[in-house]
Image: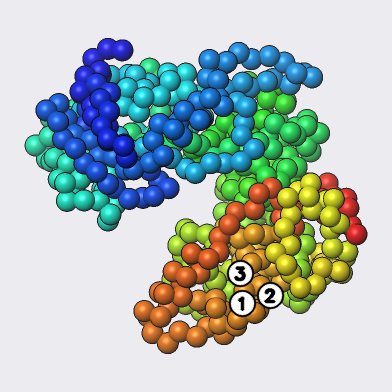
Amino acid sequence: MGSASAGLVSIFSNGYRSLGAPVSSWRTLASSSLYKHYKRNSKGAVLSCLSSSKIELACLSSKVDVAQTTTSSVNGYHKYDRLLPCPSENGPPRVEHLVVSEGGPVLEYICKSLDLPPLFVADLIHFGAVYYALVCPQPPPSATPEQIRIFKEVTAPSVLSKRTSIKGKTVREAQKTFRITHVEQFVEAGTYLRVHVHPKRFPRCYEIDWKSRIIAVADSYVVLDKPAGTSVGGTSDNIEESCATFASRALGFSTPLKTTHQIDNCTEGWYCILLMLHCLCVVLARTKEYCSIFHGKIREKKVKKLYLALTAAPVPIGIITHYMRPINVAPRLISEDFIKGWYLCKLEVMECKEVPWPDPVIQQKYCIEDFEWPSKDRAYECKINLLTGRTHQVRAQLAACGAPIVGDSMYMPAAIAEMANPGLSPFGKYKKYTTESDKEMAVTKWFARFGKEPKVAIGLQACQISWDDGEHFYEARSPWWRSGMA
């Protein structure tokens, strides 16, 4: 495979295995975040974390025939055959971190370093699951002294000064990561690589009649009724299985649609491929220019969105205010009390009416769990005007009010636990801690106990979207829960 082949030793839980590649490589698994086992040989250095080793990879390879990369047409739709069949369940994440010591094509280097089939690596690159940075980022706190030594070795000023590719850049600029976009892309010595070997998958993308979800097609944008259980614009390790990609194919567009906002995967609604929600109206831009224009409308608060939420308890009419912890970790922590530096969260409950709880057939179809909510004879459909736009805002605020969204595995169990044991929530109305150490312990316990992502859908829909004072106005179809009320 060329010059990038000679002298790598990889350490697995059952001993050593020579792969024969002359590289310095830094390897770990995101699922454990622990760096273990270090071995240095005459050609280079390898840092490796204990993993499920080749057994896990062999199982994956047996399920995914990477040699089958042909395309065909089914019912007029373009069929995509890579990394298929798509698994119905996501396995544990696996992320490998590498530092190149001898330059060459990125595909060849990854194949040799991780012992992966070339077509499989090509698919990962196509999925957007491979990243690079010119300079290796700072190791995590769990790194060993030896691993830190290697980091200092490859980022020493005397080493970096010899690399023409980073001249004129600050260290921070050189450590910025970008997606690898082509299998033949050259990576020079010292380049950092991050490979998401097990990207998050979205099997729902292959079950949906995407043409039927298109609400409107304009010269500058497309409005989509986003199905629950799908990603609007993709994830950090999978930009292939997304609403933007599949809607583009359904419409026969040669230029992919572009996202304009981010919405939770479990939300439904309209999506002008500019937004991303659970079930919702989303707007997707057809051009970079309109994407920028629509972003400007959002910043200027010219875009209005209304939501429908199916809650397990009634919610009072009026404006609800909370403050959200400014840390990008789910479940989001919020407080009724003002806390300096926390984000303001405001929503307006415009209507709240009693409706039947979804029947068992619908619950099964959309993988809805009730988490033993004490009263399942009725639910409540609320119309909500979102006054501030924070990730998980509607879900977190309603749960904090004791009215979690039906089926929301991330926030409903926490709300039930807080009802049964007031004060369990670290920043709830009945918080019990008196010292900073008690608070940190409460937060740690909270995250350890809660935060499970919903499988498919929850009772939340972005039902309306409009901008330019209503000149552009779109509504989503009826939410999933209305199709089978008990």
**Farthest-out residue, front:** 14
The quadrant in which residue 17 appears is: top left
Which residue is labeled 2 in the image?
402
Q: What element carries label 2?
A: loop
Q: Please state, as top left, top right, bottom left or bottom right, where the C terminus lies in the image.
A: bottom right
* Mark sitting earlier along the chain (2/3): 2
> Residue at (88%, 65%) from the top-left corner?
355
- Mark count: 3
Vertical relation: 116 (above or below) 132: above
Label ID, residue 414: 3
Query: Residue 373's quadrant in the figure?
Result: bottom right
Q: How far apart are marks 2 and 1 (CA)?
A: 8 Å
Q: Does the CB distance between marks 2 and 1 fall below 8 Å?
A: yes
Mark 2 in CB contact with mark 3 (< 8 angstroms): no
- Answer few, some or many: residues within 10 Å of disc 3's Cα (few below 14, many 20 plus, some between 14 and 19): many
The three-letter code of the residue at mark 2 reads Gly
Q: Which amino acid does label 1 sit on?
A: Glu
Q: Give the percent coordinates (x, y) of residue 433.
A: 45, 84
